[in-house]
Amino acid sequence: METNIATTPFGRRPMTLGMISSQVTARAVAKDATVHKWHVFQDIKDARIALGATDRALAILDALLSFHPDTTLYGDSELVVWPSNEQLIRRANGMPPTTLRRHLAVLVECGLIIRRDSPNGKRFARKGQAGEIEQAYGFDISPIVARAEEFKDLADAVRSEKKAFRLVKERLTICRRDIVKMIDTGIEEGVPANWGRVQEAYQAIVGQIPRTAPRQALEVIAEELEGLWAEVREALESFVKTQKVDANESQNGRHIQNSKPDSKFESESGLGNKDEAGGNVADTDNVRSLPRRELPLGIVLDACPNMLWLVKGGGGIRNWREFLAAAEVARPTMGISPSAWEEARTAMGEQQAAITIAAIFQRQDQINSAGGYLRSLTDRAKAGKFSVWPMVMALLRAKLDASKAAGNGAEAAAVDLETAGKVVRTESRLEISDALRRSLDKPGRGP
């Protein structure tokens, strides 16, 4: 008795060595082999790339497996299914016939199924009088049983590789985060180190990370980052140990590290003694007595000519936008952290903060910790006790004094200072307080 289950012809198909290998493997399956078809299918999905299968091909394999009534497959059972193309298309979510045929061929090439062609190229099953299947023509899924262990090993290898890749990505992320935080801490706390070099080394390593890279390449980069991490960590720990020793040896429990305690610039900025650091009444009067208008860009550049070094191509600074761009370049070269810069911009305003950066950059050789100094000025600005006017005037006076000492350019420097003074005196008929006038007239003394 012959039952024609499907009438879709196979057509003429070439035989390949891959097909022959699959057939040999299928014949070698142990009769007592037993597998759970959906567990094996999961392994195949995980090892899809290693097997060379496509997503569409696996969707078809999923449909083919669903045509076998049993979930558990045995090596000695009938493992041929014979659905028509129309049935497969319905279970494969409406896949076009041409796509179906192409990905069926992929399954055969990968050795996941074997074609069992009938004499007339149709898919059907011949049944006996008792209804049992004597011969079936269609797709043999016996490789699911025969290669189950192989699929599992491949899937385990792929899962292990994915896990290793995920772990190295996590190492990179954690290491990058920790290094950035430690650099910021070192800069803000005034830890003695070449933080500019550390930042350059960090950027050089991070710049090697491509968008897509094999795990082995990421492992090498992670090792480089971890080496830098250990270097920065050691610098911070050494500083902390030194501070603890100093604290134990000090009777009052405090030790202020300052390699340049007589820094003229820090004295000019009102941080030279306890009264000035706290902001006395005279300081507050000085700030209130200053003009509210912005400083002219020309006067700022006269006071802070070093900013011109940061302009690409050696050009000048023609407007405030270019001045702000130069300040953005100056900040990291002095080791000022992004958080300190952002806090200063919030408290002072972007333009005033940029002028402050320029003034610090002009005298950076006289400042022990540019980042800590900027934070101190930011705190004074929050309390309404800081203005960039006296700072710029002090720089102009220093320029005048230096020109007089050198015996050249004194007249030009005097003109710069006189111009700045006129701006202060004529702004809204503002009266300068006696304390401020004494501050401006006194050499080597600032806000």
Image (cartoon, rainbow, N blue to C red):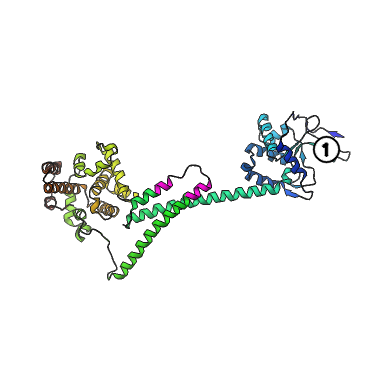
Identify which residue is drawn at 39% across, 49% down. Answer: 201
Identify which residue is drawn at 19% across, 46% down. Answer: 392
Of 236 and 46, nearer the camera is: 236
From the top left corner, tell me how far across and down residue 211 is, in percent.
48, 42
Q: Tell me the residue that label 1 is attached to.
A: 135
Report which quarter residue 110 is drawn in: top right
Was residue 144 drawn as part of the magenta stretch in this picture? no
Q: Which residues are magenta?
A: 202-220
| Quadrant that contains the N terminus | top right
Residue 196 can be seen, yes or no? yes
From the top left corner, tell me how far across and down residue 222 is, in percent.
47, 51
**Callout count:** 1
From the top left corner, tell me how far across and down residue 190 is, in percent.
31, 57
The residue at the far right in this view is 129
Name the secondary structure under disc 1.
Answer: strand
Q: Amino acid at mark 1?
A: Gln
